[in-house]
Structure formats: structure tokens, C-alpha cells
Image (tube, rainbow, N blue to C red):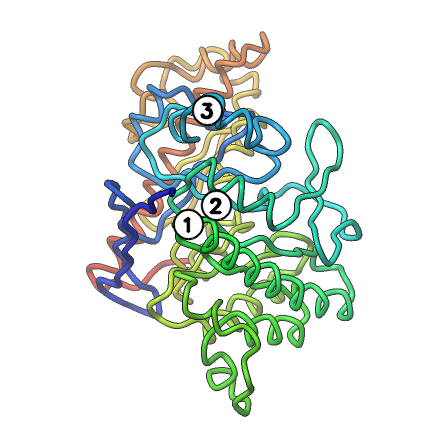
Amino acid sequence: MAKAQEFAFEIVSRHQGARLGRLELGQTVLTTPTCLLHCKGGAIQHQQPDLVARLAPCLVHTSLSQVHPKPGVERLKKLGMTYDKMIHTENPILLSCTEPYRSRPDAFNTATAISVWNYSGRSQVTVKQYAALVDAIKPAAVVAMADIQTSSASLKRQRKSALRTATFTKQLLATLKASNTEVKVLGSIVGGSHKQAMTESLELMVPLADQLLGKPTCSFMFEVIQSRCVGYSVESLGSGESPSQRLAMLEQCSVAIPENKLKLASGISDPAAIVQAVKLGYDVFDGQLAIQAAEDGEAFWFEDDLSMSRVSLWNSEEKEAMVPVTSTCDCYTCTNFTKAYLFHLLVTHEMLATVLLTHHNVHQLQGFFEMIKSCIAEGRDLPL
């Protein structure tokens, strides 16, 4: 029997709709709002264990495409270690079936399985296989398997997605219970930019969503989902919707999801959009902004008003800049290396450039969320 890590989430304070929370995952205690670190290829992306240890504690996300078909259930069991030990981190793990910002075809999921795309092509994963991976990885929490479509999918397809996702979630909870696998599950809210489809997803997944949305009480098909989900993840964000559509999606879900549930919104990279979502009560965001910028050879930092500045280290003007990226940053990169050295690493195509830039950017992104949390705790209005 896989023993679940302790999970507790409580709201400490609120301001302007934003909320400061305390999230306990096993031995790790996080404050929210916060961002995720992401895994790729069996390691935290572009980071060595010693550099990860220099960052603030965080929730580490791995997507299904990074663990299926390899290393897979059999390899993990053969190694005799949990996934967090394999990637050398003390941080808690969050497993989900999606990878933020990675485009995916819409048409290959079925009523019994979802498609996973990685270096080996396309493979399909059933609920039973997903549950087996959960048991092998032993994450602190898992986002339920979902039939996720991009925002461009039709209303008919999104409505089908809502029903399939609720069915997958019910089957996953039943399978985990039958195998005595104890893990905390977050439900997936789908529907994209189609309000009707998202409403149907909320009615199936969230307790009392129909009353909160101002609709007559409906008879729930999936009561088990509502009692066992500790939070919800809003999917399809960052998949082609306009800023106004994204805001409408976030507002619709924020109204329906109960206050005591953890709210995850991945697929948002713009700092102003993150602040908007924080004001709507969202707690966890992905950290792909830091990775994408580093892969482009860019470093960024935030001012006290939460505005972001960035610099491209590919710029030839930086080749003689014997100063850190920013003098106000105390990360490992800025305290040990200059912009000129980072320029040299980039033009010589050294992989260390991406490692150092990712570390700096993640440190800055965590600092961005610390400033947000300070505003909430002190009752100050969030800028942007």
C-alpha cells in the first residue's frame, strides 16, 4: 500500500480577492501563491540538484509524457525508488497529464484513453495505466487524467471532453481506492473558451457548482469526485485563447470552485495575467516563463511594482559587461558570474548558459511571488 503524504491547505489571509495560503505536503510547507518547477527527461529542467537546493522549497511538476513510456512503471519498480529520489530532490512531486506550453493535437484522445506525445511518438494511456504510474511515482498530489482540448476545439468536442474528463476522474479515484493507493487528487476543469462546455465540466466536477453559477440544482452523476478532490486545475489555458477569453475562463471557474480548495492555473506566462489570476483567488502557477526565457538566452528581473525587465545575453553589447545580470539579485548566477561570461557561454553553445540563466530566472520568479504574498499579507493593493 502506497502511503499518502500529509496534505493540508488553509487560507491565512485575503485581500482584493487574492488569498495567502499555507500548503502542507509531507514534510514540506509552502506558502501560496507559488509557482512550479518542471521536470524533463528524468531531471528538473536545466537544473542540477545543488542548484535546486539553493532555491526556495517548491512543488515539482512532472507530466505524463516525461514518465511514459520511459522510465515507466516497471523501470521505476526495478530501481526500487520513488520518482523524487530518482530526480534527486526533497521537494514534493505533482503529476499531471499535460505539459504547459507544449502544443498537442486535439483529435487523438478516445473515450477510454488519452494520447501522450514525446520523443518516441504517440502512445495511449488508460486510466488503469495512469493509476499504475501514480502508484510507482508516489507523488504528493496528482491531477486527474483529462481529455484536454485546445481552445480552438469546437463546442461539441469540448462538451464531450467535459463528460470524458469526469468519467476518467471517477474511474481513477475508484482504481486508486481498489489498489489501496493513497494520494491526493486534483480534479481537471476543461471546456476551453466555450462557456457552456466549461459550465458542464464544473457541474460534473465541483460540489454545488450549479448553485454557485446561479443555475437550478442538478442531480450529480459523480458524487465521489466532489468529496475526494482536494483542489482543481483549470486546463487549456495558454492554448490559443485571447486575453479576454482567458480572464473569462478564470473568473467562471473561480466563482464555482469552493474557497477551501486549492486552485491551480497553468499555461499563464505574462506577469500581469498572473496577478489577475491571483486576484481571482488562484494559488499555484507553472514556472515555464523562467525556462522559456533561459532557452532564448534571456534573463529577467522584477521591480518593486512587479514590473518585469529583461535582457538578452545574446546581445553583443554584453560581451564586455563585467557586471551581474542585476545588482539587486542574490542568486548563485548573479553572485558568481557576469553578463560577459554568460554571453561567452551562449556564443560557444555551452549548456551551462541555460543552466545558469534558468537558475536566475526561477529565483526571480519565486521572488515575484514573494512580493505578491507580501502585498496580500500587509493588505496592500497589488500593482499591475
- Tag 3, which secondary structure? helix
Q: Nearer the viewer, mark 2 or mark 1?
A: 1
* Image-quadrant location for residue 160: bottom right
**Which corner quadrant of the image does residue 326 belong to?**
top left
Numbered mark located on residue 114 in the image:
none
Type of amino acid under label 2: Asp
Which quadrant of the rendered structure holds the C terminus? bottom left
Disc 2 versus disc 1: distance between alpha carbons?
30 Å
Q: Which residue is mark 3?
A: 357
On screen, residue 141 versus residue 236, left or right, reads: left
Query: Quick check: marks 3 and 1 in contact, CB under 8 Å?
Result: no
Q: x%, y% of residue 52?
A: 35, 26
Q: Position of residue 211 (x, y in %)?
A: 48, 86
Dot 2: what SS? loop
Residue with the mark numbered 2: 286
Viewer-nearest residue: 25 or 312 = 25
- Side (left or right) of 195 relative to 313: right
Residue 180 image label = 1
Which of the pair 120/22 is nearer the observer? 120
Q: Which kind of residue does numbered mark 3 sit on? A: Leu
Tell me which numbered mark, 3 or 1, is placed earlier along the sequence. 1
Looking at marks 2 and 1 on the same chain, the residue that comes earlier in the sequence is marked by 1
Quarter of the image that includes the N terminus? top left
* Spatial CA span between label 3 and label 1: 42 Å
Q: Residue extending furthest left?
A: 378
